[in-house]
Image: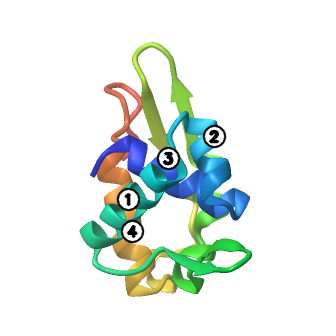
Amino acid sequence: MDKVKCEAFLLAAESGSLSEAARKLGYTQPGITRMIDALESEVGFPLLLRTKKGVRPTSDIEEMLPRCRASAIPFDPPQYIHLGLAVPSLHDLSPAAKKFISYIKEAFPEPAGNASS
């Protein structure tokens, strides 16, 4: 999993628009679509629902999306993302949400010295 795919997904999910995510990341809309399709193939389940009016996260992912974004803090340089998910209990999340959290944590590992146990 790579960080650009994850960022493309987060931006699209938050804005409700693949075109807006593309604009913010400097890609074309078809490029963002391919990235999110690849990410969905990688995790093994859909992350976004596509409609004529845009996109929105699936119900499994929607419940944890605000916590993912609020926990993502960029460090520059180097580019790191710290993802400290504040969830009441992983047991409260759906299997799809748990799997997505593990993929996000893999893509955005905590920098050395910032890891929480």
Going from N to C along the chain, the mark reached first, 1 or 4, is 1
Horizontal side, residue 80 vs residue 55: left or right: left
Q: From this view, report whether residue 88 is shown above or below residue 94.
A: above
Which residue is identified by label 1?
A: 34
Which residue is identified by label 2?
A: 23
Kindly state the secondary structure of the residue where label 2 is placed.
helix
Q: CB atoms at circles 1 and 4 under 8 Å apart?
A: no
Identify residue type, mark 3.
Answer: Glu
User: Image quadrant of residue 46?
Assistant: bottom left
Dot 1 surroundings within 10 Å: few (below 14), some, or many (20 or more)?
few
Which residue is identified by label 3?
A: 7
Kindly state the secondary structure of the residue where label 4 is placed.
helix
Which mark lies nearer to you, 4 or 3? 3
Going from N to C along the chain, the mark reached first, 2 or 1, is 2
Residue 28, image x, y percentages: 51, 44
Identify residue type, mark 4.
Answer: Phe
Outermost residue toward the top in this view = 77
Mark 3 vs mark 2, CA separation in Å: 12 Å
Identify residue type, mark 2.
Answer: Arg
Q: CB atoms at circles 4 and 3 under 8 Å apart?
A: no
Which residue is identified by label 4?
A: 100
Q: Observer-nearest residue: 1 or 97?
A: 1
Q: Residue at x 43, y 50 (%)?
A: 31
Q: CB atoms at circles 3 and 2 under 8 Å apart?
A: no
Horizontal side, residue 1 vs residue 77: left or right: left
Which mark lies nearer to you, 1 or 4? 1
Q: Residue at x 56, y 55 (%)?
A: 10
Q: Observer-nearest residue: 83 or 38?
A: 38
Kindly state the secondary structure of the residue where label 3 is placed.
helix
Q: Is residue 30 visible?
A: yes
